[in-house]
Image: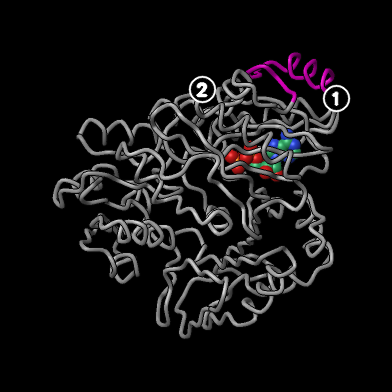
């Protein structure tokens, strides 16, 4: 096992990784920008190194400084968390060249899955069902029109290098195609430095269902069931649950096995998420994330498997601590992403939290680095914590979530807690009856 792990991230996920390391007896190094000097992950780490000014490109994305921090502290591995450098193949390669372990899959697998066109082709070759669409990149208007006519409107044009819900456009008919193709290509080029786009069928009322997988680094693969992340705003998840209220046990094992076999077939190492849209009983692959996800705790709560611990084991060459047969789902878990934002307008609300009181009690987990007196900096994304609740079944989980949200006090800034207080009292949410458009429609009604 590693002696010392450097955590190349901030906020709740840095703390999450630190906790796993401590439980495993591994020393930790926190890196931080000047804006995060008093952050909780910095206070709790064994060592910390300031790697630059607030802007992410000068600190959390500054590969040179992070490598220097590894060398100064003697860290033998780096956990990238999510976001920042977590899906940067070049970073994985540079670490490797310095004899430092990247806690994640190989640079090759990050590359393949980072290009959504290649990812889709790879998935299809591995027997994963995909959304009908173009075989590869589309550049010519005639081709775009022919493909759209074949699969039927509406279609969606997506940037091969897109991410974070950006770089997508829905096209409703032949007339809209010319402008849509042109603008998505231009926008993709400007935003991602790659103007390749592809076309797929736009599904009208799907759910977003994703399967948690792990490659053991020795040619084996397992799955840990699915998460339902259909409640989204601007293609970004806000509320996630496991297991999905829409998936049967039989479907779970079937799609899970397809994904686990694919992971084994790829020789994939570490944690990953295979994302699907799910409509009328069918799964359609959209992408694979080659890292730990924000919403991983809902899976942990119902399987009682520590995913970060398993990532560390696999990266150190020790394989997984469990087999597929030992994965059991017990109860139901829901996560709410608590953002420092107005709950209606979603305008960011950085500033000082003058009083903080998280909920507690049976089945309640709060992953957050904030405390009374903490100043939420304006430079990073607005996630300040996650409330994860587990119950023996979905109704119990919802009852517990309702009371936990009512206990949660974050004074001084605005948060999205009031939105969740409304959602957990909504009859569609209580019934588990929603698709990926439900939340946008709900918010538009006010
Ligand atoms: P990103 O990498 O930006 O997260 P994804 O490909 O994972 O992009 O898609 C994000 C979200 O966009 C999905 O969860 C879904 O809400 C919507 N979406 C993507 N592809 C389609 C599609 N073919 N039909 C309908 N909605 C889609």
Q: Which residue is mark 2?
A: 265
Rendered location of residue 317, percent (x, y)? 31, 36
Q: Which element is circle 2 on?
A: helix
Ligand 1 location (quadrant): top right
Q: Which residue is mark 1?
A: 152
Rendered location of residue 168, percent (x, y)? 67, 37
Residue 390 included in the magenta stretch of the image: no
Residue 145 included in the magenta stretch of the image: yes
User: Callout 1 environment at 10 Å: few (<14), some (14 to 19), or many (20+)?
Assistant: some
The residues colored magenta run 132-151
Name the residue rendered at 69%, 41% in the picture. 252
Name the front one of labels 1 and 2: 2
Q: Nearer the viewer, residue 218 or 246?
A: 218
Assign the N terminus to one quadrant of the image: top left
Q: Which element is circle 1 on?
A: loop
**Apparent side of residue 86 relative to residue 438 in the rendered image (left or right):** left
**Apparent side of residue 334 relative to residue 150 in the rendered image (left or right):** left
Q: Nearer the viewer, residue 52 or 285?
A: 285
The numbered mark, 1 or 2, whose residue comes first in the sequence reads 1
Dividing the picture into quarters, in which one does residue 10 lie? bottom left
Rendered location of residue 395, percent (x, y)? 75, 67
């Amino acid at each position: 096992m590693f002696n010392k792990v450097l955590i190349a991230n901030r906020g709740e996920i840095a703390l999450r990784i630190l906790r796993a390391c401590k439980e495993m007896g591994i020393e930790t190094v926190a890196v931080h920008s000047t804006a995060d000097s008093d952050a909780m992950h910095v206070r709790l780490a064994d060592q910390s190194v300031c790697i630059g000014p607030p802007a992410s490109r000068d600190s959390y994305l500054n590969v040179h400084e992070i490598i220097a921090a590894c060398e100064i502290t003697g860290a033998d591995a780096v956990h990238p968390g999510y976001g920042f450098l977590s899906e940067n193949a070049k970073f994985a390669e540079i670490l490797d060249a310095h004899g430092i372990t990247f806690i994640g899959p190989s640079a090759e697998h990050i590359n393949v899955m980072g290009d959504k066109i290649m990812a889709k082709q790879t998935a299809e070759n591995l027997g994963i069902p995909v959304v009908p669409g173009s075989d590869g990149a589309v550049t010519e208007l005639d081709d775009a029109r022919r493909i759209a006519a074949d699969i039927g409107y509406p279609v969606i044009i997506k940037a091969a290098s897109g991410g974070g819900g950006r770089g997508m456009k829905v096209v409703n008919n032949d007339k809209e195609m010319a402008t849509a193709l042109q603008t998505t290509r231009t926008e993709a080029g400007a935003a991602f430095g790659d103007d390749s786009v592809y076309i797929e069928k736009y599904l009208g009322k799907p759910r977003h269902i994703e399967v948690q997988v792990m490659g053991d680094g020795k040619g084996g693969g397992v799955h840990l069931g699915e998460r339902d992340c259909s409640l989204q705003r601007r293609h970004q998840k806000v509320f996630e649950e496991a297991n999905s209220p829409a998936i049967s046990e039989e479907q779970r094992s079937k799609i899970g096995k397809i994904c686990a076999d694919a992971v084994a077939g790829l020789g994939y190492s570490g944690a990953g998420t295979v994302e699907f849209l799910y409509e009328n009983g069918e799964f359609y692959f959209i992408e694979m994330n080659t890292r730990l996800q924000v919403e991983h705790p809902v899976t942990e709560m119902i399987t009682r498997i520590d995913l970060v611990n398993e990532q560390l084991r696999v990266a150190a060459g020790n394989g997984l601590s469990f087999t597929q047969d030992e994965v059991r789902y017990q109860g139901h878990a829901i996560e709410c992403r608590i953002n420092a934002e107005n709950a209606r307008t979603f305008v960011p609300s950085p500033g000082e939290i003058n009083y903080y009181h998280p909920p507690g009690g049976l089945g309640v987990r709060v992953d957050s680095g904030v405390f009374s007196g903490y100043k939420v900096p304006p430079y990073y994304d607005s996630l300040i914590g996650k409330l994860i609740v587990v119950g023996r079944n979905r109704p119990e989980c919802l009852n517990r979530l309702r009371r936990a949200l009512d206990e949660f006090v974050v004074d001084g800034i605005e948060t999205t807690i009031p939105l969740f207080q409304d959602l957990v009292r909504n009859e569609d949410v209580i019934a588990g009856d929603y698709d990926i458009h439900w939340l946008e429609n709900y918010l538009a009604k006010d």
